[in-house]
Each structure stands twice: as C-alpha cells, then as structure tokens.
Amino acid sequence: MTEIPALAGYTPEKRMLIDGELVGASNGAEFDNVNPATEEVLGQVADGTKEDMRRAIAAARRAFDETDWSTNHTFRKHCLEQLQEAIESEVDQFRAELVDEVGTPVAVTYSAQLDWPLADAFRWPAKMIEEYPWERRLPDNDLAGLTSHRAVRKEALGVIGAIVPWNFPFEVTVNKLGPILATGNTVIIKPAPDTPWNATRLGRLIAERTDIPAGVVNVVTSSDHLVGEELTLDPRVDLISFTGSTATGKRIMEKGAATLKKVFLELGGKSAMIVCDDADLAAVLPSAAAACMHAGQGCALQTRVLLPRSRYDEGVAILTAVMQNIPYGDPKDMSNIQGPQVSALQRDRVQGHIDRAVEQGARLVVGGGRPANQPKGWFIEPTLFVDVDNSMAIAQEEVFGPVLAVIPYDDDEDAIRIANDSQYGLSGGVFSGSLERGMAIADRIRTGSISVNGGIWYGADAPYGGYKTSGIGRQNGIEGFEQYTETKLVGWLS
Ligand code: NAD
C-alpha cells in the first residue's frame, strides 16, 4: 500500500457556530461521526435542535439588518482574504479529517475534494468585490414631462440558508460561502449529518481567526433533517442554496413556497460519455474509470457510456478490463480512487439499484456486490453493466455508487438522442478523433457542463449547474455570484 506521507493529526470541533460563539446544542445532545471505511466512531458533534436553528437564523438576520456587513466592500474583502489564509493554514487537518469522515480516497483530496476548490474559494470572490460592476447607468428617460437619471444597483440579497451534502462537503460549502459573503449576505450553513466536522472546523476558524462579525456565518449541525428544514420554512431566510438529491430539492421548493423563498438548487445527474466511432478507444475508455472515483458519489460523474455499435465489442472488452482493475479499498491508500459509500444506508441503496438492473435484464460483467476482502466498511465492488437499454432504471436513475452502464448506439444522432433522454442535465463528455465533430455533438447535449476530449471546466470562475431536474441556478462564476444579489432600480431628478 502506498501510504501518503503523514496524514496529519487533528483536533475535531464538536461545537456549532451561532452568533459568533462556538456552542453545543441547547439541550446538550451530541451525535456520532462515523468512519465509513472502518465503521468506527470517530467522535461526536453537537446535535443541534430547531431552537438552535432559529437562534442562528435570528443572528444572521440581525447581522444583515443591523451591521454594515452588506455594504462595506473593503471590510468584506479583508475578511475573505483572512478566511482563505486561515483555511490554508489547516489544509492538512482538513485533508485528514475529510478522509476519515467522508471516506474519500486521499488522492481525491488533492483534486475536487479539497485542493481544487480551496485554490480560489475566497480569493476569486474577494477579487470580484473589486471588479464586479455593482452599478450601471441607464440612459436618462423623458416621462411625465421630467428628465430622470437612472441606475441599476446590485445589492446583497439577505439571509441565506446553505444546505450541504456529504459527498463533497468542503467543496460545496466553500463554493457557497465565497460568493455568499462576497456579495454581502449572511448565512446559516447546515452540513449533512454524515460529514459535520469539516464545517465545524470552518466555523472555528471563522470565530478564532477572522474578523467576520458575529452572526454573519453560522454553522448548525444536526442528525435530524427537519432541523435543516426550518431554513426552508422561516420567513427570515431569503434564499436557500441547496446541493443534494433531486427529491430533497423538490421538497425544499415546496416548503419554501409559503414564504416565496428564492432557491439555488444543484441536484442529481446521470451524465453520458459519448464515445464516437473515430475515437481511440484504448486511449479514451480508461477515463471511464472516473465513474468509480470516490465510490461514484459525485453528481457530475459520467455514469452512462455510449458506445457505437460498430465498435461495441472492442469497447466492452476494454471497459471490462478497466473496471476489473479499479484501485479501491482503504481511502488512506494513495493509490486508491474508490473508497466506501458514505453510510450503510447509501451502500444498501446502491445495492438496490444493482439488483434491480439485474432483474431488468442488464448484463452484469464486473462486480455487483460487496467485496469479500473488505469485511468492514460500506464498500461496493466496481460494477459494470453492458447491453443496457436507456429506458432501464440503471440508465435513468442516479445511483451514486461505483456503477457504470454501457449503452450501444447506431450513429451520432442516436447518441445525442440517448444522452438527452434523461430527466437530468448536469454534465457529460464527448470523445472524438475530430474536435469539430466532438464540439458539434457537445452543442446539442442539454446539460449545464460538458467536456470534449477530456477537457476540465472546473474553477471558481466557472458557473456550474444543471438543466432540467438537475437544478436551478449556478455555483461559482459571475452567474453564481449574481445569484446571491438583488437588483435595485434607482431613478432621480437633479
Ligand atoms: P439529501 O439530498 O437528502 O441530503 C442533502 C442535504 O439535505 C443534507 O444536509 C440533509 O440533511 C439535507 N436535507 C435532507 N432533507 C431535508 C429537508 N427536508 N429540508 C432541508 N434539508 C434537508 O441526500 P441523501 O439522502 O443524503 O442522499 C440521497 C441521494 O441524493 C443519493 O443517493 C444521491 O443520489 C443524491 N445526492 C446527490 C448529491 C449531489 O451532489 N447532487 C449529493 C448528495 C446526495
């Protein structure tokens, strides 16, 4: 096993951050944080109550309404720079903690789980505070016999409820927090119960290492989803920024309707990798292994591989070898790209998807169950289904496990039709020997992001999100930044 040099020791933070104070739950309750790779209890964290949540909302409301946080650009920039620096000083602790509580392979922390988002998490939004056109002038108008001057101003939106999933908890949290704070809002962060410590560590850094005023950022942990639901019900919250399942996203919209909440929803996906008949299959298909990265627990992963019938057998043979050789197991082993599912519940859900695919007639060629050599931990084998019809559940539903479905197609039109025949529209990929052909296909895929010949679109400046039931709004980029603003029109006479 290739152990990485020294996974750091760390002191986890049990306490929440409410109104500038690091506090336990009002009733003293705590819940366990469990390591998905070993099933061992790592420690505890505050089990926040609805009352704690309401107190956090009140603090965020007061900080927005009664301080100059929402209008003081210079101060906000200073605070964001402090926060970036504070997190960077504990990057090794974040890394070790994420491996333990998320079960993420350590290799993934050097990319999307930690290092990629951290690079510009607060730096880019801080730069935007200076560069963003907060005001634009409109031409004077002549109405009712008056000549009015006019401007459009962008302002902070208010109190944001940020609800975070367990699969990429740090990535999602900082990509919400950066633009939320840069645009002058206040926030309550509600981490997933499975992965609370990265958020409480962030809370501790904010409290102890930055000048961010009390109430501007609150972190409320809870084992009870309904504590998070308070955010969707409370009229003092202006927008819910949610990343997670499409089912919960729909519930949030429904619950938020009574108070006409604005929503940003980043939801599920079932992305297609289209491999054209002119692609170099031996070079291209190994990248399909990414579907198993972090045990397939990524919303943008390309979990359907579309192979041309003319080269189907050749492609299936290569994919079979790829999936038989996925390095998986202990997340602390640097050579593994796949660790466990995050919980027993998730492991059972994934197994249910696999069993249903077999029942529906998909041909299972690799994996399909629990690995015999991993008696502890919530592992599922890398699993390959071939001869999948796109109407099968395994091609339509988000599995969130290390499961790849291979679907044959006739020609480019057929591949585009199959890729788009999905309730989701989050991401995807096209591989072709001709960049022009690949780009032309990419243009016709109804998804919020797409990679051509392996290009990576990720970045703090890149607006990421979904079409169709994959969501509403964008994370990051100018589009993500503006999502946390209100638009005010001003007309005046001189
Ligand atoms: P979930 O969507 O239920 O949970 C995500 C977050 O929402 C957690 O913080 C949770 O506490 C919170 N939440 C749950 N119910 C809520 C409610 N009624 N009001 C407010 N907040 C609520 O996800 P899950 O049940 O943990 O996972 C189920 C499936 O969701 C997975 O199998 C996977 O398909 C999908 N998922 C997708 C993503 C993504 O990035 N798109 C992330 C996680 C899970």
Image (cartoon, grey):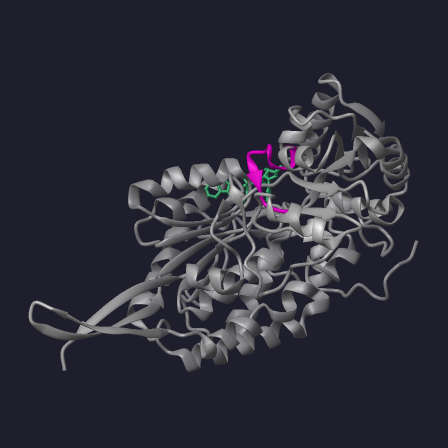
Asked if residue 419 lies in the magenta stretch, the reply is yes
Q: Which residue occupies 62% across, 64% down? A: 459
**Residue 244 found in image quarter:** top right
- Is residue 397 or residue 39 the one in the foreground? 397
Q: Nearer the viewer, residue 294 or 379?
A: 294
Q: Is residue 428 above or below residue 352?
A: below
Q: Residue 156, relative to residue 242: is it above or below?
A: below
Q: Quadrant of residue 72?
A: bottom left
Tell me which residue sits at (39%, 45%) in the image: 232
| Quadrant (top left, top right, bottom left, bottom right) of the C terminus | bottom left
Region in magenta: 418-427
Q: x, y percentage for residue 133?
A: 40, 74
Q: Which image quadrant shows ligand 1?
A: top right
The x and y percentages for residue 196 are: 59, 53
Which x, y percent locates residue 261? Answer: 35, 48
Residue 101 visible, this angle: no
Left/right placement of residue 408 relative to residue 266 reads right
Question: Residue 388: within the magenta?
Answer: no
Residue under the image location 37 percent in, 56 percent down = 57
Q: In the image shown, does 284 or 258 lie closer to the viewer?
A: 284
